[in-house]
Image: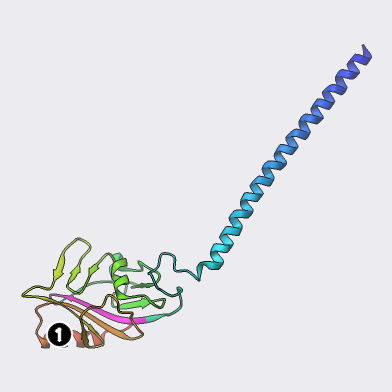
Amino acid sequence: MGRRERREREQKRDNYAMKRSSEKRKQTLIAAGVLGVIAVIVGYSAYTFATLGSTNIGGPENAGELGSEHSHAAILVKIFGDKFDFSAPAYQIKSSWIHFEGRDGSTVHKHATGVTLGYLFDTLGLGLDDQCFVFQDGRSFCTNEDYSLKFYINGEKVNDIRDYEVQENDRVLISYGGETPEEIEAQLLELQNQEIIR
């Protein structure tokens, strides 16, 4: 009986050792797999972070790197003589490339080369072309027999501003209505007197 018990004990011990060794191997393989996945995630994150500055992910087509420029321009939008309020939260910092900020609705901040006013209005959800200014709720103000949409950059009348890239200290007027030349001059003077917030 002693020999038989000894063999059973040795067999149990061998089975236990084999089972324990198998569990350790399994845990080691799982740990190695988890560490491998973590290494891939960290590597991809580091690569993405390192190359982020050289792309314009989420930005306008043909824009330079974010931070490649920092320009400020004054803007005034008048609809039937009423000033459009870009200081409302709905119009603040909708894009990192060009925006209004700090609850100010009169200064456009541009943070990259190649960013146009058309892109600014797109990010704000406002429709703008050479004939119409369209609010987010669908109300549109379009050139017709009685009223017209007019654009001025630095006091000069232009046909369209969508492709215009603002430069430092520019002054942009968008006016809709049936204004007389004197009323336009008054709006341009109001724009000229607007402070550009830096």
Amino acid type of the residue that numbered disc 1 sits on in the rendered structure = Ile
Quarter of the image for residue 18 reads top right
Q: Main secondary structure of the magenta part?
A: strand
Query: Which color scheme did the rendering employ for the protein?
Result: rainbow
Secondary element at image label 1: helix
Residue receiving disc 1: 184
Q: Please provide percent x and percent y for residue 155.
A: 22, 88
Indicate left or right for 107 with 176 as reference: right
Task: Characterize the local packing of mark 1: few (<14), some (14-19) or many (20 or more) Cα atoms within 10 angstroms.
Answer: some
Identify the residue at horizontal 32%, vertical 71% (top origin).
119
Indicate left or right for 19 with 65 as reference: right
Identify the residue at horizontal 28%, vertical 78% (top origin).
106
Q: Please provide percent x and percent y for residue 4.
A: 90, 14
Quarter of the image for residue 146 reads bottom left
Tell how many labels.
Answer: 1
Quarter of the image for residue 182 reads bottom left
Identify the residue at horizontal 74%, vertical 38% (top origin).
25
Q: Give the range drawn in magenta.
A: 72-81
